Amino acid sequence: MAEFPLDPMLSKMIVASDKCKCSDEVISIAATLSVGNSIFHCPKEKQVHTDNTQLNFQTGNVGDHIALLNIYNTWKDVNYSTQWCYENFVQVRSMKRARDIRDQLERLLERVEIEITSNPADLVSIKKAIASGFFPHVARLLKNACYRRIKHPETAYLHPSSGLAQVSPKCVLYHEIVLTAKEYMRNVTETEPKWLAQIAPHYYQLKDVKDSESKKMPRCQTTSTEYCI
């Protein structure tokens, strides 16, 4: 992990991708997550078009991490076209930075003897690799569309820009939390609680991830005004 100049959770995700046989996909996700808050350019006068374009990368409610992978792969397929970025409201500078980071990560994989493997159709393996890095950032759905972290009492909401915001999966992992009028989870992917005890037995016990649907869950505190960033 120390060989990668990234946040430790991203580094752990990459190391785990070796066992999951999806290192090629995971370094693309890590690169796009490393360039900043959003790779999209959202002009107010074209907000509807921007929203529809973003949803095109979320086919099947795949989650935000897989959507980032889809964006990067599509950009690669069109030969890193600047025009494609303009047409899809994607920031050219961010994508070029992501490509540079990805190239560096690919070289580092060779140094640490992690084989570059690709399995784009196996979304479960990709999600398990992501969960291996971000296992502390797992939250379970409460009764009124907000989430509570499994190991901590903090609550948060899916960021409105998330492709899963209208779906509200039962259990999610997130890249980061941003604070406005509420705490929002940004870059979110659905995950399975049963994976956690396997991926991080030092952190989760079976009682932590046991399905609690039958238990009475508290409601989150809400405010009358919501803000999107």
Image (tube, helix red, strand yellow):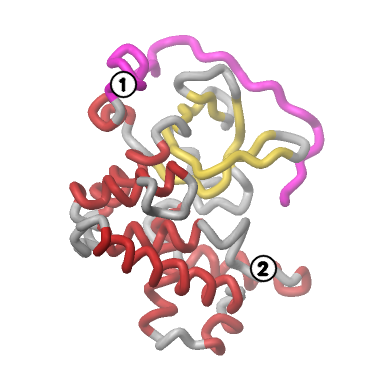
Q: Residue 139, percent across and down?
A: 48, 29
Q: Which residues are magenta?
A: 201-229
| Badge nearest the viewer, 1 or 2 | 1
Indicate left or right for 44 with 31 as reference.
right
Mark 1 or mark 2: name the one nearer the start of the chain.
2
Residue at the spot of label 1: 202
As displayed, is residue 37 above or below residue 215?
A: below
Task: Residue 64: give its label.
Answer: none
Residue, x 38% and y 41% (percent of image)? 133
Seen from the viewer's position, the closer of residues 47 and 202 is 202
Q: Quadrant of residue 193?
A: top left
Q: Residue 158, percent across and down?
A: 57, 41
Q: Amino acid at mark 1?
A: His
Q: Quadrant of residue 177?
A: top right
In the current view of this chain or complex, which residue is farthest to the right? 225
Q: Residue 40 colored magenta?
A: no
Instruction: Please say whether residue 77 is visible from this viewpoint.
Output: yes
Q: Residues within 10 Å of mark 1 (few under 14, many from 20)?
A: few
Residue at the spot of label 2: 48
Seen from the viewer's position, the closer of residues 229 and 46 is 229
Q: Residue 17, percent across and down?
A: 26, 51
